[in-house]
Image (tube, rainbow, N blue to C red):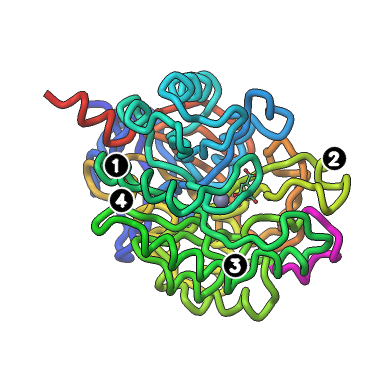
């Protein structure tokens, strides 16, 4: 057999060095290499399984000025993310199997890496139809208003949860308490959607979720919310690396839901690192024009899919967190929660990898690939991958895109309907 690719001298999480032989999109052999069409020597790289970013807003359609599947997945890949899970608060929102299929079709035509699409959850949505059509998960389910979505009330949420539970689906929830939808400054925004309110919202959602329902909390912004979450919990890079204090008070580029908190709260979030299941970016790009109109009307959301792993890899270098914990929270846990095959270093694992050099640089928005052209992380330390492999194919190499690999990952509803 001639393999597609051999990764030579990979340092495995155990510390052992080995050669990985890849064919048909999977790791086939670990040890002495088989003959292959292409070889990459990994001795000077840190090799990570490709990240699964389970919370991105790829936009497209009438919102293509902000981002589209091509630029959004180019940005993902340049940041070591090889699977993105798209959120359904598009315009129009994904609420029917037809809209879901059209969204998957749009991604198949333009994405350059793996992707999945979630189903929108509103009272008249066809949840069963979308589940059977391949939705990966349900939500993010908004229990408070946010960009391009109204909040659901508890009664509606209860009914929709019952349906998701009956299907065996995963409910992913954006839970907040909102006192003021049009704050004037970043501090106002922090108070209007407070950390304490977020904890109350997490508890309220946990209380109405049916026993045994698969439940995932999106973007917990405080340590107390991480503690309050039932099921699994996700945290974003912006809540870990940014406080609202690093922005001018009226700079809407720092406006995001849930809001950036103060410096002390940000630091405390790191202290519960071990309790966080998933780091996901909530990549939610808006144009600079939208962000600079007026703070009160500026949309909430910031881009981050390309900078997530680079920021975390810089934190690994500073020994703030371990390399294996980053692999867990960015690749293995999200894949397990969603039921996506695992990327990794064992025979049979999905062959998605990113190779990081041992060199720290700084984030420069002008070098990123998201369409919006700005980053709230400008100037922060980062380690960007040099090579990225998707399903055994080198898709990105030192700034160049070599190949595209738009693999769709359907959810369990679709997969079980295909079982004989
Ligand atoms: O800040 C946010 N932006 N939070 C969300 O929940 C939605 C997102 C968006 O789509 O822009
Ligand atoms: Zn959200």
Residue found at the far left of this picture: 420
Q: Is residue 54 left or right of residue 33?
A: right
Q: Quadrant of the C terminus?
A: top left
Marks 2/3: CA–CA distance: 26 Å
In the image, residue 144 lies at what x, y percent?
58, 53
Q: Is residue 47 visible?
A: no
Q: Tag 1 or tag 4, which sits nearer the N-term?
A: 4
Marks 2/1: CA–CA distance: 40 Å
Q: Tag 1 or tag 3, which sits nearer the N-term?
A: 3
Mark 2 Cβ and ligand 1 under 8 Å apart: no
Q: Is residue 109 above or below residue 275?
A: above
Q: Secondary structure at mark 2?
A: helix
In the image, residue 115 lies at what x, y percent?
45, 34
Mark 3 neighbour density, 10 Å: few (under 14) some (14–19) many (20 or more): many
Q: Which residues are magenta?
A: 243-253
Q: Secondary structure at mark 1?
A: loop
Mark 4 neighbour density, 10 Å: few (under 14) some (14–19) many (20 or more): few
Q: Nearer the viewer, mark 2 or mark 1?
A: 2
Q: Quadrant of the N terminus?
A: top left
Q: Tag 3 or tag 2, which sits nearer the N-term?
A: 3
Q: Secondary structure at mark 3?
A: helix
Question: To which residue does mark 3 refer?
Answer: 240
* Tag of residue 289: 2
Q: Pick whichever, 379 or 62, lies toward us.
A: 62
For the residues bearing labels 4 and 3, Cβ distance under 8 angstroms: no
């Amino acid at each position: 057999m001639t393999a597609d690719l051999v990764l030579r001298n990979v340092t495995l999480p155990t510390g052992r060095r080995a050669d990985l032989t890849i064919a048909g999109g999977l790791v086939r052999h670990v040890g002495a290499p088989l003959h292959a069409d292409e070889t990459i020597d990994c001795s000077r790289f840190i090799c990570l399984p490709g990240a699964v970013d389970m919370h991105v807003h790829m936009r497209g359609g009438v919102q293509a000025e902000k981002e589209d599947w091509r630029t959004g997945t180019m940005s993902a890949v340049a940041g070591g993310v090889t699977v993105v899970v798209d959120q359904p608060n598009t315009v129009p929102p994904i609420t029917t199997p037809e809209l879901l299929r059209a969204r998957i079709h749009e991604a198949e035509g333009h994405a350059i890496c793996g992707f999945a699409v979630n189903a929108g959850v509103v009272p008249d949505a066809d949840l069963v139809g979308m589940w059977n059509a391949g939705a990966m998960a349900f939500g993010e389910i908004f229990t408070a208003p946010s960009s391009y979505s109204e909040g659901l009330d508890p009664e509606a949420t209860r009914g929709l949860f019952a349906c998701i539970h009956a299907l065996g689906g995963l409910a992913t929830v954006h839970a907040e308490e909102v006192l003021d939808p049009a704050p004037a400054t970043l501090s106002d925004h922090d108070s209007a959607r407070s950390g304490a309110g977020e904890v109350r919202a997490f508890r309220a959602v946990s209380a109405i979720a049916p026993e045994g329902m698969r439940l995932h909390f999106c973007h917990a912004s405080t340590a107390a919310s991480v503690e309050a979450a039932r099921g699994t919990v996700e945290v974003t890079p912006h809540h870990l690396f940014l406080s609202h204090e690093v922005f001018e008070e009226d700079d809407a580029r720092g406006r995001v839901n849930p809001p950036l908190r103060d410096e002390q709260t940000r630091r405390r979030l790191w202290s519960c690192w071990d309790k966080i299941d998933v780091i996901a970016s909530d990549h939610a790009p808006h144009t600079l024009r939208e962000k600079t109109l007026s703070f009160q009307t500026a949309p909430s959301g910031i881009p981050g899919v390309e900078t997530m792993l680079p920021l975390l890899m810089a934190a690994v270098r500073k020994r703030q967190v371990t390399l294996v914990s980053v692999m867990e929270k960015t690749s293995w846990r999200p894949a397990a929660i969603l039921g996506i095959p695992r990327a990794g270093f064992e025979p049979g694992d999905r062959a998605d990898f990113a190779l990081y050099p041992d060199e720290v640089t700084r984030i420069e928005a002008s070098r990123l690939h998201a369409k919006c052209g700005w980053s709230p992380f400008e100037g922060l330390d980062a380690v960007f991958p040099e090579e990225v492999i998707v399903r055994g194919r080198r898709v990105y190499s030192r700034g160049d895109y070599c190949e595209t690999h738009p693999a769709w990952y359907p959810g369990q509803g679709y997969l079980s309907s295909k079982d004989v």
